[in-house]
């Protein structure tokens, strides 16, 4: 592989699916077919992809030695020595600068969200990743800020219930990631790889996952039947999307506990057909209901 392709691989494009949260406000603000809003949302999506790539490079530089001892991460181009730390630093700096400038050009509000995202990632890398529970909130904030960025890019206000649902589902994914690390590496090796894992154990994480799962489902159900939601969309049929959310979360729990997966949600979604179908059906029927086709 060429240096360019190895560098692109280090940007982890397979993880950019997380940036899809940027598009959620576009759907629920009923602006998918409004071209100026669609264009701004796609630009915001591209900026977050560029920004995420820069952050991933920085993460790999910080965790270089730990990644070399990790059974999966040791094959990353930087950890495997296929690209140099100097190249990674230069590329990260360029991509970070481009994303900040692009964010500013899109709008001042969006630029502020981007700056907050970078600040949270910096705090996470240099301190908060070793602080129990706060590490989960930092991971969750990445999803939340993506959605907020998508909202300010097209200047819409999103439902408080939708914000709560996003925070909860992202904490759910963060908990699944921590559990996967513990199970995959074993307690002793996991602690060497990530210090905060000494504060967790599978039982505690399972208890947390149970609480967050119930809270997520309840919050989404309340969002669907909220008078504000019904008034906004002029229909009470959003509740019909609840079975897809319920199935998707239960399927993800099955994959965590019975298949030993959950470390990388972007890989889980695209490698498990039932889960992918439930996500696609949720998106499809949500659009039909939001635009009152059904």
Image: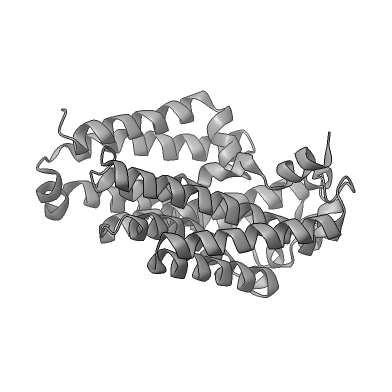
The answer to whether residue 184 is above or below residue 147 is above
Residue furthest front in the image = 105
Q: Nearer the viewer, residue 209 or 48?
A: 48
- The x and y percentages for residue 260 are 64, 38
Q: What residue is rendered at 45% in x and 70% in y?
A: 112
Position of residue 256 in the picture relative to residue 144 (left or right): right
Residue shown at the point (55%, 28%) measured from the top left: 272
* Image vertical order of residue 192 relative to residue 39, above or below: below
Q: Is residue 259 left or right of residue 249?
A: right
Q: Could you tell whether 55 is left or right of 226 in the image? A: right
User: Residue 284: where, in percent of width, then height?
Assistant: 31, 30
The structure residue drawn at horizontal position 72% and vertical position 56%, both measured from the top left corner, is 57
Q: Is residue 224 above or below residue 168?
A: above
Is residue 262 in view from this perspective? no
Q: In the rendered image, which quarter contains the C terminus?
A: top left
Residue 137 visible to an observer of this rendering:
yes
Q: Nearer the viewer, residue 181 or 290?
A: 290
């Amino acid at each position: 592989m060429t240096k360019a392709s190895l560098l692109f691989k280090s940007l982890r494009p397979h993880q950019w699916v997380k940036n899809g949260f940027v598009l959620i406000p576009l759907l629920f603000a009923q602006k998918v077919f409004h071209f100026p809003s669609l264009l701004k949302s796609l630009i915001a999506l591209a900026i977050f992809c560029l920004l995420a790539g820069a952050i991933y490079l920085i993460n790999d530089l910080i965790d270089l030695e730990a990644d070399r001892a990790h059974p999966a991460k040791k094959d990353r181009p930087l950890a495997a020595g296929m690209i140099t730390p100097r190249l990674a630093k230069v590329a990260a700096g360029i991509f970070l600068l481009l994303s900040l400038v692009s964010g500013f050009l899109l709008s001042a509000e969006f630029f502020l969200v981007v700056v907050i995202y970078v600040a949270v990632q910096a705090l996470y890398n240099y301190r908060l990743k070793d602080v129990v529970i706060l590490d989960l909130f930092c991971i969750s904030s990445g999803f939340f800020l993506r959605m907020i960025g998508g909202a300010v890019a097209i200047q819409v206000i999103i439902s408080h219930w939708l914000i709560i649902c996003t925070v909860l589902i992202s904490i759910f994914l963060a908990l699944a990631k921590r559990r996967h690390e513990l199970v995959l590496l074993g307690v002793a090796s996991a602690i060497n790889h990530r210090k905060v894992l000494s504060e967790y154990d599978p039982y505690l994480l399972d208890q947390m996952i149970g609480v967050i799962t119930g809270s997520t489902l309840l919050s989404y159900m309340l969002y669907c039947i909220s008078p504000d939601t019904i008034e906004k969309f002029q229909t009470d049929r959003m509740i019909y999307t609840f079975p897809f959310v319920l199935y998707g979360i239960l399927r993800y729990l099955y994959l965590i506990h019975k298949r030993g997966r959950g470390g990388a949600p972007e890989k889980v979604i695209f490698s498990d057909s039932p889960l992918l179908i439930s996500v696609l059906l949720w998106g499809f029927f949500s659009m039909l209901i939001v635009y009152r086709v059904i």
